[in-house]
Image (cartoon, rainbow, N blue to C red):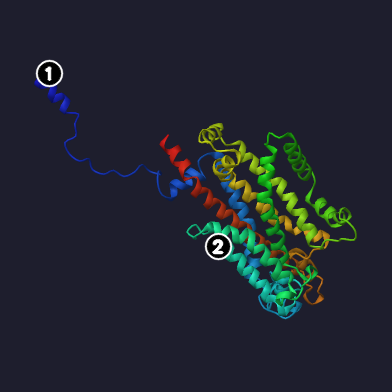
Amino acid sequence: MTTSGKTASAAYLRTTVAPPERPPPLTSGPLAWLRENLLSSPLNVALTLAGLYIVYVLVPPAVRFLLVDAVWTGEDRNACLVSAAGQPVGACWAFVASRLRYFVYGAYPDGQLWRVNLVFALCAAGIVWLLWTRAPRKDLGAIFFFGLFPVAAVVLLYGWPAIGLPHVHTSLWGGVVVTLVVAFAGIVVSLPFGVLLALGRRSRLPLVRLVSVTFIEFWRGVPLITVLIMANTMLPLFLPGNMSPDKLLRPLVGVALFASAYMAEVVRGGLQAIPKGQFEGAASLGLNYWQTTRLVVLPQALRIVIPGIVNTFIGLFKDTSLVSIVGIFDLMRTIEVSLADPRWATPVTAASGYAFAAIFYFVCCFGMSRYSIAMEKRLATGHKRQETDR
């Protein structure tokens, strides 16, 4: 190559460090986020404006009713009729405060409330043990929460005279206690039973598959209200002799069976998403059916359907309010009974009570939803790395 050729080639090589340049406009920062997520197209602009309008219409009145114009203290209805300036008042939180004990415990005896509080504390400890990612011995936490805690809760709430705990009939239970009992019973039973039903529906044994399919389709084809009514009125007819199950136990059984059928379909979706190669790889290692299911298939399937499982739990938790139809004094039922108290009869009393229930359900359901998202992100890290590498 000639000298002139070498000089021409060298002209394309940078001999000094290039000065830093500013990033292109609207590619980073708050403005870029707004453009990408809210203003990326005419349709998104229209939806953003519509959303802002809905927020403007709904949020300020709700804030005024729940906080700004609310009445926080008072002895009776007079505090929640009109304000000092003669203007209509907002939420009557004084009513909620006066009936809070009934909303939480129902008619549970005052001298035995420590038993309910101990159950709440044990439940919180079990939840923290299971949900805290750095907690030690999660296996023992699962045994405690799904095995020991239900037994301890029954003994504490219902009583056992042999150890000095007098009986407290379930007719005296109410409020948040009943709501949590129904939800916990449905959640604890539906997950393992739903897994067994999902495996049974995919079984190669015709009888097992037929029983599983019949059970799932029957319970999924019946509304929960019908299930509760039938459990309350028809369950005693199928029991021998004069045996009559507890009035609270009847809807517990109905809710658990109903939720198990829906949970089975959620888990089945995860099982069907497992590639065939996973089964072949397990077989090549000499694993039998149950070892393959327990060590290879179920961990992956349950991880895939975490959103569906939590969605079923959230729906079940909200559906506990339907037990009031069969005369069970859950949170909604205690609020409805309290509204009949003439000492607190005001135009805003009902709205205040239902607002309290809405806040309670929202906090519980939102907590489950956020934890589900965090768990899903933590368990899906490997998949995200593979997609990034591609």
* Residue 134 in view (yes/no): yes
Vertical comparison of 173 with 84: above or below = above
Q: Could you tell whether 194 is left or right of 126 in the image? A: right
Crowding around mark 2 (Cα neighbors within 10 Å: few <14, some 14 to 19, many 20+) is few
Above or below for 227 versus 153: above
User: For residue 159, what is the image quadrant?
Assistant: bottom right
Q: Is residue 130 visible?
A: no
Relative height, residue 174 to residue 3 (above, below):
below
Nearer-the-camera pick, 24 or 198 = 198
Q: Secondary structure at mark 1?
A: loop
Q: Mark 2 belongs to which amino acid?
A: Val
The residue that label 2 is drawn on is: 128
Which quadrant is the N terminus positioned in? top left
Could you tell me which quadrant the C terminus lies in? top left
- Residue 226: x and y, percent? 82, 51
Q: Residues within 10 Å of mark 1 (few under 14, many from 20)?
A: few
Q: Amino acid at mark 1?
A: Met
| Labels in figure, total | 2
Disc marking residue 236: none
Question: Quick check: 212 left or right of 374?
Answer: right
Q: Position of residue 260 (x, y in %)?
A: 71, 48
Is residue 60 positioned above or below 75 on the image?
A: above
Q: Secondary structure at mark 2?
A: helix
- Foreground of the two, 282 or 97: 282
Near-viewer residue (279 or 71):
279
Choose the circle earlier in sequence order: 2 or 1.
Answer: 1
Question: Residue at position x 69%, y 40% from top?
Answer: 200
Residue 1: mark = 1
Question: Residue 233's spot in the image, x, y percent?
Answer: 87, 56
Q: Residue at x 15, y 24 (%)?
A: 8
Left or right for 26, reference 373: left
Q: Residue at x 58, y 61 (%)?
A: 127
